[in-house]
Image (spheres, rainbow, N blue to C red):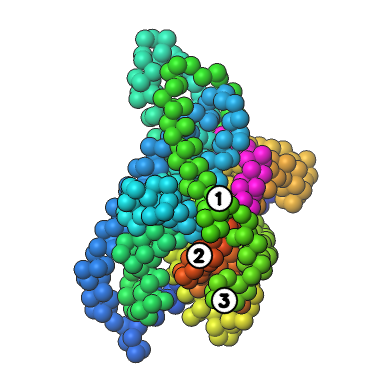
């Protein structure tokens, strides 16, 4: 058997090398993901040393579990439908039309996706509450508010994923259909949408995944009355201490998420090859007015809660002022906090930096491994399996992960109870899929013949990577850094379990402030939310500057 000309390594040895390279990431995933999740599930299934499957089945047969599951699926479907309705016109307008301020508008519409979910929940409560501008609608604490919050959060996913595909779509088939007499609607229905179907289906499945596992938004807006599987796990664990029920729901969620990830993977495999050459945007015409009008609706939909949040943070005792911001250096009314919010902000920044570093190192290694050309079917299957396996943290409950950390990593050989790395490790696992999905399309789009040419000139694997891959991937790598940092900054599900009382992050502090009575506490929560949203917006603007055209799938 002859070695491959590009690598000089025989196929069986390539498989062994790939397996050896995957050992490190698999070990990390095994210790910090599989072990905690298995411990959480095992805590519920094994009672007094015996497997108690009937007990778990009794939990799943509870009427409330049925209602929670129905609300989870129903709200996720409604949130997905509303996200597509708002996101698709904007995806078209921002990818194909030469609108003034297009880059800034696109960055602004992407900010909600990385906003801390607690901040989004607080913003909608401020908007829809009794004293809010839309309080007369009576939507506060209703399923409508939750679905609106989910769409606010996820329309950005549709814009980024479908917009990237739309940006690289060849316009000539549509132009040919129009020249033959097809109306704009017929061109959209018979040419454009079929070409975009894989991207739309993939985006819809990812949005459904995010909606079904939403935590902070549902917890703030729905409370106990309207719970999803994610928030029900949290309430069962922290309030009722019913670990068996929480474990049963975790298993149910894991099964659903795994099925959805398989579906997402198949739709992604069916997608057209991602092009890195974007079609130049054209001047808008009158046929583009509906899409531009819907984009305007989305801008208003996104801006209204945020403006309400900022305005609320500037109102102190019915008057304008910066008192809520000055109070961030304190601990709130009746000492609601153990440490000032400013200290929590420093902790958040430091923790997010650590988590981002971990996610980038692991994500880059994985992205390189899964995008290298496969020479055998076994090698291709192994790469595909690794790609899907490391997407699992995207869908597994962050609450399950956080609580699993506490019960699985508290004894030798992995005792991290007192380690400051516990929170950044959990946040890195949450951010990892975003890093991988940002880098994989770029690396997969590189022509492998460039690496073969470098190898034929005597370049080793490292030098080939530095001369071929790095020049193409450095901008997406910086963008992935921004995504990971923003996601870590706002992570709340796992952090709510793991952050210590004397060392909390800002999302945890915000949730504690809105849970404590007092006008000052609520005002501080609004001010802290604005500060966190501002930091996130700055990061996203930087990410948009580093954006690679036509590449943006999650």
| Relative vertical location of residue 488 with respect to residue 104 in this rendering, above or below | below
At label 1, counting other C-alpha atoms closer than 10 Å, the crowd grade (few under 14, some 14-19, many 20 or more) is some
Q: In terms of secondary structure, where does tag 1 sit?
A: helix
Residue bearing the label numbered 1? 310
Q: Nearer the viewer, residue 81 or 257?
A: 81
| Relative vertical location of residue 391 with respect to residue 270 in this rendering, above or below | below
Mark 2–mark 1 Cα distance, whole angstroms, equals 16 Å
Residue bearing the label numbered 3? 335
Residue shown at the point (36%, 60%) measured from the top left:
222
Q: Which mark is residue 519?
A: 2
Residue 7: give x, y in percent of width and height.
68, 48
Residue shown at the point (26%, 79%) measured from the top left:
55
Residue 549, magenta (yes or no):
yes
Residue 218, magenta (yes or no):
no
Residue shown at the point (44%, 13%) measured from the top left:
176
Lower sequence index among marks 3 and 1: 1
Mark 3–mark 2 Cα distance, whole angstroms, equals 13 Å
Lower sequence index among marks 3 and 2: 3
Q: Nearer the viewer, residue 552 or 506?
A: 506
**In which quarter of the view is residue 58 placed?**
bottom left
Q: Nearer the viewer, residue 239 or 337?
A: 337
Q: Nearer the viewer, residue 119 or 71?
A: 119
Residue 539: give x, y in percent of width and height.
64, 49
Q: Is residue 325 left or right of residue 186?
A: right
**In which quarter of the view is residue 543 placed?**
top right
Q: Which residues are magenta?
A: 533-554
């Amino acid at each position: 058997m002859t070695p491959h000309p590009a690598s000089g390594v025989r196929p069986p040895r390539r498989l062994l090398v790939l397996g050896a390279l995957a050992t490190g990431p698999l070990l990390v995933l095994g210790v910090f993901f599989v072990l905690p999740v298995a411990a959480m599930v095992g805590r519920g299934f094994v009672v007094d040393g015996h497997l108690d499957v009937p007990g778990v089945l009794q939990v799943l047969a509870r009427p409330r579990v049925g209602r929670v599951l129905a609300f989870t699926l129903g709200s996720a479907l409604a949130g997905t439908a509303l996200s597509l309705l708002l996101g698709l016109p904007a995806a078209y307008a921002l990818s194909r039309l030469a609108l003034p301020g297009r880059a800034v508008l696109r960055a602004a519409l992407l900010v909600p996706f990385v906003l801390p979910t607690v901040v989004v929940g607080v913003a909608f409560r401020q908007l829809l509450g009794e004293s809010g501008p839309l309080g007369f609608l009576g939507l506060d604490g209703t399923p409508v508010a939750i679905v609106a919050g989910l769409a606010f959060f996820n329309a950005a996913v549709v814009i980024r994923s479908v917009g990237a595909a739309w940006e690289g779509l060849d316009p000539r088939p549509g132009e040919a259909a129009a020249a033959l007499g097809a109306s704009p609607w017929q061109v959209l229905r018979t040419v454009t949408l079929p070409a975009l179907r894989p991207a739309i289906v993939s985006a819809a499945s990812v949005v459904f995944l995010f909606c079904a596992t939403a935590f902070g938004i549902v917890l703030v807006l729905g409370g106990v009355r309207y719970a999803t599987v994610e928030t029900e796990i949290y309430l069962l664990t922290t309030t009722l201490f019913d670990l068996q029920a929480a474990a049963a729901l975790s298993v149910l969620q894991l099964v659903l998420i795994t099925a959805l990830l398989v579906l997402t993977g198949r739709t992604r495999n069916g997608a057209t090859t991602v092009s890195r050459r974007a079609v130049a945007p054209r001047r808008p015409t009158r046929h583009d007015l509906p899409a531009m009008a819907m984009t305007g609706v989305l801008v208003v939909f996104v801006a209204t809660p945020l403006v309400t949040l900022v305005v609320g943070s500037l109102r102190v005792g019915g008057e304008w002022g910066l008192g809520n911001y000055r109070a961030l250096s304190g601990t709130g009314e009746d000492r609601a906090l153990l440490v000032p919010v400013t200290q929590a902000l420093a902790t958040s920044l430091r923790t997010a930096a650590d988590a981002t570093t971990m996610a980038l190192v692991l994500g880059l290694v994985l992205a390189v491994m899964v995008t290298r050309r496969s020479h055998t079917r076994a090698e291709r299957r192994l790469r595909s399996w690794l790609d899907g396996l490391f997407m699992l943290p995207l869908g597994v409950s962050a609450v399950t992960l956080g609580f699993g950390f506490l019960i699985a990593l508290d004894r030798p050989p992995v005792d991290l109870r007192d380690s400051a790395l516990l929170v950044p490790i959990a946040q890195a696992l949450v951010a990892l899929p975003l890093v991988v999905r940002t880098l994989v399309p770029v690396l997969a789009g590189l022509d492998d013949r460039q690496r073969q040419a470098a190898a034929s000139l005597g370049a080793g694997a490292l030098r080939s990577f530095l001369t071929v891959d790095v020049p193409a991937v450095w901008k997406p790598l910086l963008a992935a850094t921004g995504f990971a940092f923003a996601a870590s900054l706002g992570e709340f599900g796992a952090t709510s379990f793991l952050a210590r009382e004397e060392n909390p992050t800002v999302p945890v502090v915000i949730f504690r402030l809105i849970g404590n009575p007092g006008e000052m506490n609520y005002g501080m929560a609004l001010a802290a939310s604005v500060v966190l949203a501002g930091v996130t917006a700055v990061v996203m603007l930087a990410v948009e500057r580093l954006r690679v055209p036509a590449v943006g799938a999650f």
